[in-house]
Every structure is written in structure tokens, then in C-alpha cells.
Image: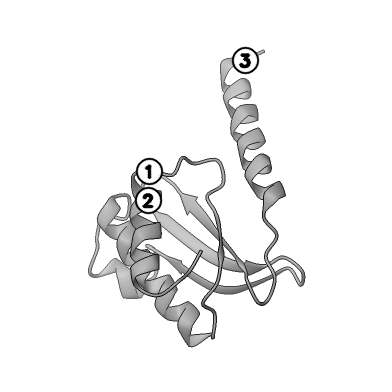
Amino acid sequence: MDKNKSITRQRQRRSHRVRNQLRGSAERPRLCIHRSLKHFGCQLVDDITGRTLVSASTRDKAVRGSHPVGGNCDSAAAIGKLIAERASQAGIQLVKLDRGHTKYHGRVKAFADAAREAGLQF
């Protein structure tokens, strides 16, 4: 088996293992994170209806001007604050964190800490 295929398979297995434990609802949606080399994004998903309730990303115009580099901890923290503000405007306080295949450190940890400080509970 090719090395890249096995790495992809391991990443998919980790992602599915985390996802099987989490199911978002309208009362407590799933906060899923997408992390790439250049950008960081997240969205609140209601898995029962299959709808995205709130989203935020470093590609948003509100963040792009203040944080030109989207792939660092400062930008992830800014996205954490932004998603918490948008969630509170939508009336959402409790969420379930879906980190996907990523480890809970670095940008993911900075994002989660900033979201907690801004009022989200998970």
C-alpha cells in the first residue's frame, strides 16, 4: 500500500472515531473545525436537520483585514471569538467540539480557549 494512502486512511479513521461519539442537535450543535495550512474555519451544525447554523472562517471579510495570515494561533483565536459572538446572537450557548482528525493543541487549542472565554460552553 502506498504511504499516502495509509496516512489518509489513518486520518479518516481518527475523524470517524471522533464523529461517531458526537451528534449535534438544535439545542447543542456540533462545532466542527477545519484547519488547513493557510486558513482556519469552523461551523455549528445541527446533524438532525443537516443544516449549518453559524459559521466563521479566516476567509471572512471581518477577519481578513485584521489578520492577514490565516494559518496561525492568533487567527484561530480571532475565529474562536467571532464564532462565539455569532452563536450568542443565534441564541446558542452549549456546543459539542468536533476536532476531526486534528490533535487538541496549537491552533485548535487556541481556538477552543478563545471560544470558551467569549462565552461558548463545551
Name which quarter of the figure residue 48 lies in.
Answer: bottom right
Residue at the (52%, 49%) spot, across then down = 99
Residue at the far right: name it. 48
Q: Amino acid at mark 2?
A: Lys
Other residues around mark 1 within 10 Å, as few (<14) / some (14–19) / many (≥20): few
Instruction: Please state if 28 lies on the left or on the right of 78 as rendered.
Output: right
Q: Give the x, y percent position of residue 26.
A: 68, 76
Q: Amino acid at mark 3?
A: Asp
Which disc is residue 109 wearing?
2
Image quadrant in which the N terminus is located:
top right
Is residue 33 or residue 91 the one in the foreground?
A: 91
Which of the marked residues, 3 or 1, is nearer the chain's N terminus? 3
**At numbered mark 3, what does the secondary structure look like: helix, strand or loop?**
loop
Observer-side mark, 3 or 1, equals 1
Is 88 drawn above or below residue 104 in the view shown? below
Q: Amino acid at mark 1?
A: His
Residue 3 placed where, x, y %?
A: 57, 16
Q: CA distance from mark 1 to mark 2?
A: 5 Å
Pointer 1 and pointer 2: residues touching (CB < 8 Å)? yes
Q: Residues within 10 Å of mark 2 (few under 14, many from 20)?
A: some
Q: Where is residue 104, by image quadrant?
A: top left
